Image: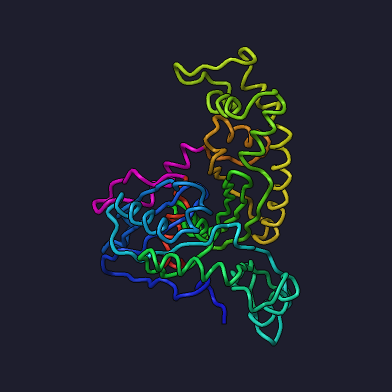
Amino acid sequence: MFSLNWLLRGSTPSLSGSSWVGPIGMELAQEEIRMVQLRKTQQGGISLVARSKLPYSGSRQEVFASPGRVRKLVRAALKRGSFSGKRVVTALPPEEVKIIPLSYPNSSKGDEQTILELVAARIDGKLEDFMIDYLPIRANPGDEDRLTLVAMARKQHVVELLNLLDRAGLEVMALDIGPAAIKRLFSSLPGASGEETVLVINSGREVSYLTMVSGRRLLLDQQVEFGEEPLLQHLCKALDIGKPLARKLLLENGFDGTDPPAGESLSIVGGQVSETLREIFKPLFLRLIEEINRVLIFSASETRGNPVARIYLLGSIASWRGADELLGSLLDIPVIPMGESLRALEQPVTDEQGGRVEGIRPEMVIATGLALRGMEPDA
């Protein structure tokens, strides 16, 4: 049986009626550990208990190769916030999880057995060496074919992470996946419609992820070759400059043509820096648009033509001024800029009196979504 308790341990309990502090949502990001904890109030709302983030003292691989360094890191991160308890919901790093869409026929064998047989034909290795879970996308009784997202991870990676966190003094309540956490958060935003479809672009250092959410359904999660480092390398080659200067050029000028912050001007190509950057990066953004258009076609087929209402741009590239405008100029869909995403992500977290709590940031999306597990319906 491999129900959605991903991947071991039971799912977190869902309580209502009384005030309850949820587990700590913990993301093991590429460069830092991120933690968020929420509270279910007596009025049924959600309030922020604590949040913190702490960079690694070295690469993630180096830190997590040492139980002592992990224990020290966890203690320091917990100390930075007023966290309650040491129960956590976390996720494996994305490079250790493979997520694939899988279409399969209605069968008397049942969904799990059918999925297991299809997955066995796709993996490189023995089935018993993997932990497998699935999220139904299309599973209506009348459908001829069913569709699901299958998540796979090597059992060795799962066991090693759980043992490592146990030795760090944490109690792992559930092991989730990043896309499910994103879905959980965005479907919980105030004003989110049960039928509304949104696309989340989470840009990373090397690659980005396109996550499609429709109401409370996770429709798709796809990795695309579009990341901060490849874009910086492209700029370095185009202008024949080093990476530090390329990064400075982007952060200070961006794509929107506005003046850089006072005292931080940088002129390489006169007053047309932003326009030059747009022209240099436009071919790479057009490749991203091709990938987006593919997932939009898939989304339309799964939502009976319900259009994508908006796109959220998160991650490192979202900090480049005008990146949202550049994407928006190439798409006929509103792209929500980083500032507006920030305000939207703060709204579901309020204090006991109903006031807004400053603290949830775009980079904390996955940690917040993990912290929400069991605190919202179908979460």
Q: Quadrant of residue 11?
A: bottom left
Q: Residue furthest left?
A: 353
Q: Residue furthest right?
A: 121
Q: Quadrant of residue 358?
A: top left
Answer above or below: position of 345 versus 285: below
Q: Is residue 350 left or right of residue 269?
A: left
- Can residue 104 be found in the magenta stretch? no
The spot of residue 275 in percent (x, y) is: 65, 21
What residue do we see at 65% from left, 69% from top?
148
Q: Is residue 104 left or right of residue 259?
A: right
Q: Quadrant of the N terminus?
A: bottom right
Query: What span is in magenta?
Result: 338-362
Q: Is residue 285 left or right of residue 255?
A: right
| Snapshot colouring | rainbow
The spot of residue 35 in percent (x, y) is: 39, 54
The spot of residue 177 in percent (x, y) is: 53, 62
* Front one among 260 and 53: 53
Disc tally is 0
* Front one among 148 and 333: 148
* Front one among 162 and 306: 162
Q: Residue furthest bottom?
A: 108
Answer above or below: position of 14 versus 51: below
What residue do we see at 57% from left, 70% from top?
156
* Front one among 300 and 77: 77
What residue do we see at 59% from left, 50% from top?
199
What residue do we see at 56% from left, 23% from top?
253
Answer above or below: position of 353 versus 281: below
- Can residue 355 be found in the magenta stretch? yes
Considering the whole magenta stretch, tell me its main secondary structure. Answer: loop
The spot of residue 64 in percent (x, y) is: 48, 57
